[in-house]
Image (tube, coloured by chain):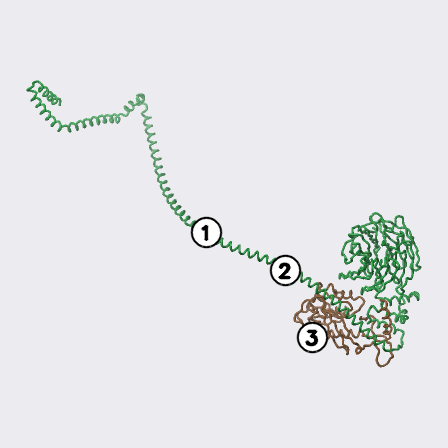
Amino acid sequence: MAGVPGAAEGLSRGGGAGAARSGWKRHIIRALKQRDRRQKASFQDVIQAYNRVLENTSFLQHLTGKIQTELTDPQISHTSRSPRTSLLVPNSLESLHAMKEQYQEQVAVLQSTGGELAYKIIELNKSLVDKDGKLEEQEARVSELDQEVRHLEASRKCLQVLVDLQETDNAELKEGYDTMLKCKHQREEELRIAVHKGEEALQGIVKKKEQEAVHRNNKNEREKKIRISKVIKKATEKTVSIDMEREDVATLDLKTLSLDIPEPQDSGKTLNRAFRSASATMLRSSKFVETFKDLFDFRKRRVNSMCSQSENLYPRAPVCVAATIPSKAIFVLEAHDSEVNGVKFSPSSKLVATGGADRVIKLWNVIGGRLQRIQDLEGCNSSITSVEFSPSGSQILAASADKAAHLWKLDGSKSKDTLTGHNDKVTAAKFKSVVHQAVTGSMDRTVKEWDLHKGACLRSIKVPSFCTDVVCSDYYIISGHHDKKIRFWDSRVTRCTEEIPVQGKVTSLNINPEQTQLLSCSRDDTLKVIDLRMNNVRQVFRADGFKCGGDLTRAIFSPDGNYAIAGSADGALFIWNVTTGHLEKSLQGMHSASVNAVAWSLSGEYVVSVDRRKMAVLWSAF
Amino acid sequence: MEPEASSWRLESSVELSLTSSTASSLLPRTRIFKIIVIGDSNVGKTCLTYRFCSGCFPGRSEATIGVDFRERTVDIDCEKIKIQLWDTAGQERFRKSMVQHYYRNVHAVVFVYDVTNLDSFLSLPSWIEECKQHSLTYDVPRILVGNKCDLTDEIQVPTDMAQKFADGQNMPLFETSAKNPNDSDHVEAIFLTLAHKLKCHKPMMLSQPPDNNKVLLQPEQKDAVTCWC
């Protein structure tokens, strides 16, 4: 190579050495240059490739050397990297081996973990696939459910429509129900009214029937009367003579005769006959024989009262052997709404009747030292002034300020009769000893006798003064008056048979069980005992503090007739001994107002007192 | 009151001189006997009275309110007698206010019970008690009638028991049926017997025999208590 460039250079310089020479030189140069250019071009590639090969060879040589050093002597590389270590190399060869083992172990461990991991990966892949499957499944289900939801939604809409329909239906039904309910109420109301009307109609019918019954009864009676009067008329046209053959004929005849004659006229008709048959009757009723006069009276009385046999007298009331004097109040109560005017025990001593200004009679049971209210008797139109039990205990007679006396039957029928005819307050009404007869006394200055069976007045006695009280014995009626007189009336005689004057207005009369003594109370603050056999005043009772409280203050005998009891204006009770005439006892402190009336039970055990301030007090000895 | 009484006295003195005998031909009016029919509700008082007065059995009957009146005139011993039956209400609420009217001037009482209903028989004493309370002074004839005896297989009140009770109360006993036509004569017979009894025990009036003017006063054979007014 060096030759070629030198040759080229020598050519170029030889051409320069001579001007004639330059022209050939230049040509030679050019020719040289061209030949250079041609030759050079053909070798250029080779040179270049050769250069490249050289280059590669050196690089590879270098590389090889390097690798060889590394491979043959790793320590050198080690040393070259750290000279100090390289110094220790001979000592740490074992450790290097250990390290190598260690690393190899580590590599093994790593490889195993790598295997595990690979396994895990596989596993995970598998589960992934599973999950994918599941996921797909779930998605499928979700879509399914979605579908279902849509379905349900649709059906819900349908049902909603149905519900709406139903609701409108229901509303309609409710409306219907409401109207029906209203209808029902209306009907019920109508029914109630109808029932009420029915009840009223029934009452009306019953009332009509009652009137009809009364009418029939009256008609029957009328016809009977007419018939009888016709028969009598007919009979009077004939004459007849009587042949008295036997002694007892007349009596029996009398009985026969009294059969068919209407009641009110009986007494009159039978009167004459009775005299004629007297001897027969008299001789047989020997148990009543005392004196001829008495016998006569007895018979006459019986005939007058229309009784054929003794069955028409009340049975004898039980007799009290000994009354015990009350000593203390065992029961106090407000008996009425107003002033209490009358009080009586029933003959059985089990009942007490009280009557007051509140127009009611109250019946009380005496049980265990208490008064137990059992019944009210209503029907009076004004204040009650006195009450009285019939001797049989089955009836109550009350006098009232409504100008009438009222009679109740206690048999549960609650029937009531009214005795009207007085023109002023009736102050007293008493049963007679003959069944179905009573006597009343009134402020209209009359005393009347009544037939209770017919409710008719039998006899009216005119008196000069107000009558305040009446009592009946078997033989006569005794009345007490404002003009300070006690009058005796016989049923046979129209005028007064006896008058006993006292010192004050008479307020009450009471007769003892033997009918031998009469107790009167008067406004001169005294009680008087009148002997009925002698018709004179036998004893006068007075006491310090005893003051007669009113015009109708009632004083009574005890049932055995041994004591007299009366209430005072200050509310105290005074008891006198009838035999000795001394004050036996005074009971104070229970009443705060004037005591109007007192009753003593027939058993002798209890006393009841009533006052102006509505109170009733039950007294007893124990 | 007074003048009337005196006029009656005059008449009575005349009347007293006459002796007992009937004079139906002279009478312008028929006598009326008031008979009340008493007993529990539904024992057949209405049917019984209806049967007697109209001769047939009422198809259906309602509860009697208060009282119904039925009358029939019968001929007894050539005397016309009007039997006035008071068919009373058995139910307490229909009768309570009327009881006193039932018993006023009553001539006879018929107690009725139902032979197929023991209770109606057992309540007879209370009816009798009521009767006693209301007719204290009069001893009226009373009879006991057991109705519905056609229902033979339902009888609850045996005859001997009823008879015993009737004897104890001193009443005649009749068992009958207002419904069964075979017994209709029986119903009639019962009331006619009663009417007969009333007529005989209740001499109508005292009158004079037409043939002579002399009267012999004779004692009556009956007991003194048989006063049927």
User: Which chain letter goes with mark 3?
Assistant: B
Q: Mark 1 lies on which chain?
A: A
**Left or right placement of residue A404 versus residue A82 in this view:** right
Q: In this view, does B177 lie to the left or right of A453?
A: left
* Residue to which mark 3 is pinned: B55
Frontmost residue, A599 versus B65: B65
Instruction: Give the mark count.
Output: 3
SS for dot 3 = loop
Does mark 3 fall on the same chain as mark 2?
Answer: no
Foreground tag (1 vs 2)? 2
> Is residue B206 shown above or below A437?
below
Quadrant of residue B163 within the rendered picture: bottom right
Residue A343 higher or lower than A81, as above or below: below
Kindly report which numbered mark, 1 or 3, lies closer to the viewer in this rendering: 1
Q: Is residue A594 visible?
A: yes
Which residue is labeled 1 in the image?
Answer: A157
